[in-house]
Image: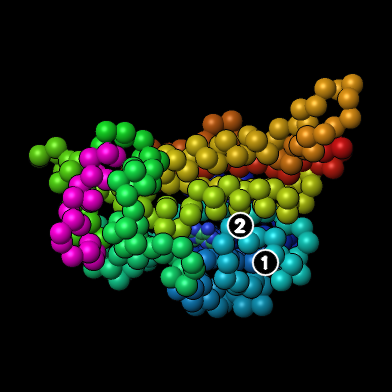
């Protein structure tokens, strides 16, 4: 989806762009290639380790970018800190990077020895260990609700609660993955490429990082920060619950005032965006063949409306 992402960003050589999910800086490097000497990139990530990696990878472009730690929902305060008033483009590539997934201490993968799943361990709020060791069955079912499998969610939640009763706490994602898989997978149904606990572990990661509120807050902040009439917002998402949330939020952000035309406006709603992708865009067969992980990837894009459209 790299070519499509860059095309929808419609990069101007002298533009100012924010990569809200800089991670290992794959997208940012390509954006910087298209920026001229007047152009600028602000890279953001809530994971301090990801920022260190990005710093190394972007070294050849020194002077044309700045990196700041923060979350999607911090966008406006990060822009104030960097002295930026309007943006020509914002990129959000949700989820986690391969580096994060493969670090066993962080607990993101089903083979992990850790059980944190926090993208920034210094942020407040429960980590995965606290969620699985202290939440009630009802709370765990609520966490699992984004996976959308009602009866299995109940089985997974009850299996966790039963396991921890009378035993020591669950200490690793590997241990947690086994408990969940034993509760939800049919015997012999384990595929070669996907551990049966994968979606349930993702749901716990989403809860540990408050990812749903972050995505919605980040999209709203981006819509308010784009240059009216031309600024672009591109979102690459990797899971079904994210595709739906992005689609709904972008649609909400393109809604005009809903007050009766004869009365003064009381709703304050203005169409900040015009959605460019009628349906979320999927990767091509050829790309999925080259990189099977892109099977679940979807791209959605929007352009900021002009000031006249908002009047
Ligand atoms: C899929 S990776 C991005 C990969 C990057 N686009 C590239 O091409 O190398 C997602 C990154 O977003 C970061 N991230 C996830 N949620 C975030 C949030 N709410 N605020 C800031 N960064 C976030 C993760 O820490 C991770 O580094």
**Quarter of the view holding residue 263:** top right
Dot 2 alpha-carbon crowd within 10 angstroms: few under 14, some 14 to 19, many 20 or more: some
Is the residue marked 2 within 8 Å of ligand 1, measured from its CB?
A: yes
* Coordinates of residue 289 in the picture (x, y in percent): 33, 43
| Residue 168 inside the magenta-drawn segment | yes
Q: Secondary structure at mark 2?
A: helix
* Coordinates of residue 201 in the picture (x, y in percent): 31, 52
The image's mark for residue 78 is 1
**Residue bearing mark 2:** 73
Mark closest to the chain's N terminus, 2 or 1: 2
The residue range painted magenta reads 153-172
198 lies left or right of 120: left
Of residue 201 and residue 309, the one placed in the foreground of this image is 201
Distance from Cα at disc 2 to Cα at disc 1: 10 Å
Residue drawn at point x = 67 percent, y = 66 percent: 78
Q: Is residue 207 above or below residue 255?
A: below
């Amino acid at each position: 989806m790299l070519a499509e992402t860059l095309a929808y960003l419609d990069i101007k050589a002298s533009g100012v762009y924010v990569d809200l999910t800089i991670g290992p800086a794959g997208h940012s490097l390509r954006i910087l290639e298209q920026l001229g000497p007047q152009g600028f990139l602000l890279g953001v990530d809530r994971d301090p380790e990801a920022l260190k990696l990005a710093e190394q990878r972007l070294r050849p472009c020194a002077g044309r970018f700045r990196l700041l730690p923060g979350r999607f929902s911090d966008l406006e305060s990060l822009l104030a800190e960097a002295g930026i008033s309007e943006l020509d483009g914002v990129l959000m590539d949700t989820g986690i990077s391969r580096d994060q997934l493969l670090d066993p201490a962080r607990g993101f993968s089903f083979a992990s020895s850790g059980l944190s799943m926090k993208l920034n361990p210094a942020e407040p709020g429960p980590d995965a260990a606290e969620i699985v060791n202290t939440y009630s069955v009802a709370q765990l079912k609520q966490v699992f609700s984004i996976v959308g499998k009602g009866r299995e969610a109940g089985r997974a939640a009850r299996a966790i609660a039963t396991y921890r009763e009378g035993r020591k706490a669950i200490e690793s994602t590997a241990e947690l993955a086994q408990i969940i898989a034993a509760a939800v997978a049919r015997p012999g149904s384990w595929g070669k490429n996907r551990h049966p606990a994968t979606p349930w572990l993702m749901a716990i990661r989403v809860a540990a990082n408050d990812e749903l509120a972050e995505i919605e807050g980040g999209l709203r902040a981006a819509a308010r920060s784009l240059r009216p009439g031309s600024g672009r917002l591109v979102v690459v998402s990797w899971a079904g619950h994210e595709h739906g949330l992005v689609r709904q939020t972008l649609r909400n952000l393109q809604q005009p005032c809903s007050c009766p035309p004869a009365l003064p406006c009381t709703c304050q709603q203005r169409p900040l965006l015009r959605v460019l992708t009628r349906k979320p865009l999927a990767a091509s067969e050829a790309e999925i063949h080259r990189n099977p992980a892109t099977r679940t990837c979807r791209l959605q894009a929007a352009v900021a409306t002009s000031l006249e459209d908002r009047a």
